[in-house]
Image (tube, rainbow, N blue to C red):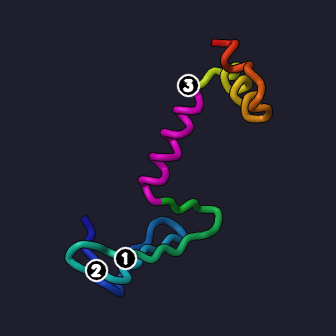
Amino acid sequence: MIRRRPGEAVLIGEGVEVEVLEATVSQVKLGIRAPRSVPVLRKEIQITRQQNREAAREIPPVAIRRLSACLKDPASKSYESSR
């Protein structure tokens, strides 16, 4: 564990710096400097992205085509007739 106070920073590898900007009892604000080639994401965003991709894989392509057809032509009964 590394402890840092506001104004102090940690270097990670080449070119990544994480600085503590502000700290209170309930939250910490961090500043992150990294090359553009290094993605910087909050973990919950990455988890949500992975969950969305997994959920999308579970839908059969034929179901997506049927839904797409229904959205393009709401009068079409192709979804109902395929059930």
Q: Looking at the image, tell me whether mark 1 or mark 3 is earlier in sequence order.
A: 1
The residue under the point 28% across, 80% down is: 23
Q: Are marks 2 and 3 in contact (CB under 8 Å)?
A: no
When the figure is inspected, residue 50 is found, relative to residue 21, above or below; the finding is above
Image: 9 above or below 43: below
Residue on which disc 2 sits? 23
The one nearer the camera, 24 or 71, is 71
Disc 2 marks a residue whose amino acid type is: Ala
Question: Going 40% across and 78% down the picture, which residue do you hit?
Answer: 19
Q: Are marks 1 and 2 in contact (CB under 8 Å)?
A: yes
Q: Magenta residues, as a range?
A: 42-57
Disc 1 from disc 2: Cα separation: 6 Å
Label 3, on which residue? Answer: 58
Q: Residue furthest left?
A: 25
* Camera-nearest residue between 20 and 52: 52
83 part of magenta stretch: no
Q: Residue furthest front?
A: 75
Q: Quadrant of residue 26?
A: bottom left
Q: CA distance from mark 2 to mark 3?
A: 42 Å
45 in magenta: yes
Give the labeled residue for mark 1. 29
Type of the residue with mark 3: Glu
Give neighbour class at mark 3: few <14, some 14-19, many 20+ (Cα, 10 Å): few
Q: Earlier in the sequence, mark 2 or mark 3?
A: 2
Say how many tags the image has: 3
Q: Image quadrant for the N terminus?
A: bottom left
Q: CA distance from mark 1 to mark 3?
A: 37 Å
